[in-house]
Image (tube, rainbow, N blue to C red):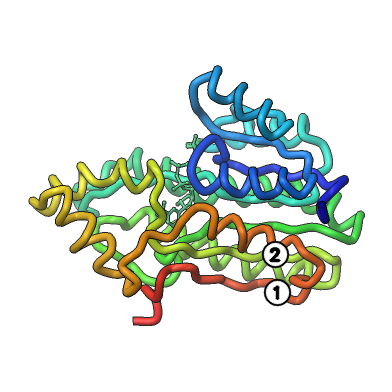
Amino acid sequence: MFLQGKTALVTGSTSGIGLAIARALAGEGTRVILNGFGAADEIARLCDELNATHSGADLTDPAAIEAMMAEAGPIDILVNNAGTQHVAPVDAFLPEKWDLIIALNLSAAFHTTRLALPTMKAKGWGRVINTASAHSLVASPNKSAYVAAKHGIAGFTKTVALEVARAGVTVNCISPGYVWTSLVENQIPDTMASRGLTREQVINDVMLAAQPTKQFVTVDQVAALALFLCRDEAASITGANLSMDGGWTAA
Ligand code: NAD
């Protein structure tokens, strides 16, 4: 239990990648604060399972983030993971969808990070782990806001890493390819509609077309990398954009 005594906030951890990271951190003794939306009984079950607390803050709202951070108190491990997707050509991209994705996938990480860093620096130890994406390195059509936000979080990660490099705080992002979660499942209908494809074609010819392994990344693989970044052995990994994409960005 190498993280006994540490506190972690994992945004967007009521499902998918964030939940797997929260489980991995809790398994090493971390006091976990969950965040995200979902059915109240399911969230209560997760809190019981992980001995965690939960903030339902809407991370598109900076005031809600400030309130969440004040309530959370000092954070040792900050995982900026909450994110959403919208698929449409840029000239048909709804401005409110653009604003939502930039707010949640990019600006929320700025707000949580700026509020968490002072106590990390004071303690001389901290970990900031941002869930970016292969789309922080390469683009796909119809994902302008998502690709812009993910390229942005990669740049933000590098900048903050340099700022705190001598303070015992590492700042990295993990860039998965397609991970099988509800976020992926939910974009299948839109992609079917926008490209005129069947469900099987979207999975095999669009999603896994880019992934040379032809396998979805698993949430547990991403969580294992996040956990490694919390180890002392990972103290020299900072400012990195760690790909876990089945070879996608090697192509
Ligand atoms: P998911 O839909 O399973 O989880 C998203 C989480 O964010 C949920 O807990 C949800 O409640 C929460 N959330 C949504 N809107 C929110 C808001 N306004 N405020 C607070 N929380 C909110 O999706 P996922 O696939 O686990 O995605 C997690 C992260 O991983 C995202 O940043 C996503 O871009 C990234 N990612 C996913 C994939 C993939 O293939 N699934 C690949 C690369 C990167």
Q: Quadrant of the rendered structure where residue 52 is?
A: top right
Would you say 208 lies left or right of 222 here? left
Identify residue type, mark 1: Ile
Secondary structure at numbered mark 1: loop
Instruction: Say which mark, if any, is on residue 192.
Output: none
Secondary structure at numbered mark 2: helix
First of labels 1, 2 by sequence position: 2
Question: Residue 133, how many percent across, how many down?
Answer: 46, 61
Q: 238 or 146: nearer the eye? A: 238
Identify residue type, mark 2: Leu
Depicted 110 relative to depicted 72: above or below: below
Q: Which residue is mark 2?
A: 229
Q: Residue at x 56, y 71 (%)?
A: 241
Q: Quadrant of the rendered structure where residue 121 is?
A: bottom right
Q: Residue furthest right?
A: 123
Q: Residue at x 64, y 65 (%)?
A: 172
Using the rendered image of the protein, determine whether residue 3 is visible from the camera's viewpoint.
yes
Q: Which residue is mark 1?
A: 237
Tally the numbered discs: 2
Q: Residue at x 50, y 62 (%)?
A: 152
